[in-house]
Amino acid sequence: MEKKISRIDINSSKLLIFGGVYSNLQALEAVQEFARTNHFSKEEIICTGDIVAYCAQPEECVKSIVDWGIHSISGNVEIQLCTGSDDCGCNFNDGSRCDLFSRQWFPFAKENLSEQSIQWMSQLPEFLSFDFSGKRFAVIHGTVNETAGYIFESTPWKEKQAILDQLNAEVVLAGHCGLPFVSQNEGLAWLNAGVIGMPANDGTDRVWCMTLEESLESIKVQFHTLEYDTHEASARMRENKLPAEYAKTLLTGTWDSNEILPKQEAEAQGKRIDLEKTAFTIPKTFKEAAAN
């Protein structure tokens, strides 16, 4: 499939970034409330894909995003659904627990999405590009060559640099891996807001989003945690006979399997993430990257 790239205009000094809704309507409603409370307009909000996945309300989530009117790219799940595939394209190992569980939730998602929702998803770009605070930004789901490619904090910088070069970008906003992080090197930045549909494997049921705010000399990057009715979301999964292990994860905050994770991220399972306590900055001059 030819890559679809959309150039958008951002005429604002702030942005809200989130991704990985994963058919979790209760979590989506929490990020929508965050947007309302903090006065983000639809033009100031970007989703990094995978609106549909593990949880129980795919159609409701797609309709809610459509009605909201925000910017979004397609994740690998959207692409697979729109091409009529029989699997999620998540890049799981064949026969692994995640692969076996996907054989439950992916057919459920297909059966519970309307033709209108599939049509809307088919129009989503795979990449966004825009200028913000004088810097070149790109939004991707996984990697340029592989929508379901995994990039983590521990991924060597040279791999991130290669993608930045491909995109002619100074800052990448990415998704897919499920964990929030910031990587910076020589003034360039790779930012992942984490996801809202599942917890970040840190032993808490919180989910994550990220805001960017322009200041006089830098771009402030701030992570935020969201709380929502995890019991409702988990119960809906169980009622629809979706993987009980994922329904449990919504409550415990730890993943059933770490198979996709590199050693550094796997060893961090159950350790509370406190990124929301740090204000990261991307200097406009790009002479030095910092975390305050």
Image (cartoon, rainbow, N blue to C red):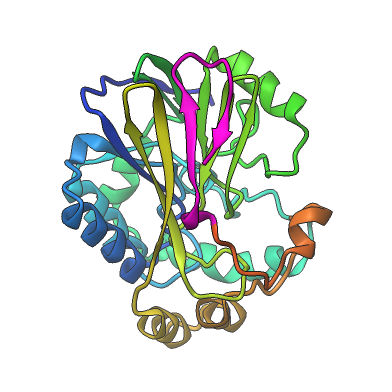
Q: Residue at x 21, y 22 (%)?
A: 11
Q: Per the image, is 221 magenta?
A: no
Rendered location of residue 58, percent (x, y)? 36, 62
Q: Position of residue 122 (x, y in %)?
A: 37, 37
The residue drawn where x is 74% and y is 56% is: 265
First to last magenta residue range:
275-292
Residue 238, compared with residue 167, is above or below; it is below
Vertical comparison of 256 with 114: above or below = below
Q: Residue furthest front?
A: 292
Farthest right residue in view: 263
**Quadrant assignment for the N terminus:** top right
Q: Quadrant of residue 253?
A: bottom right
Relative depth, front residue between 155 and 87: 155
Above-or-below relation of 232 to 60 = below
Let me know if residue 140 appears in the view.
no
**Which quadrant of the figure has residue 269?**
bottom right
**Which one is nearer the viewer's eye here, 210 or 187?**
187
Is residue 276 inside the magenta stretch? yes
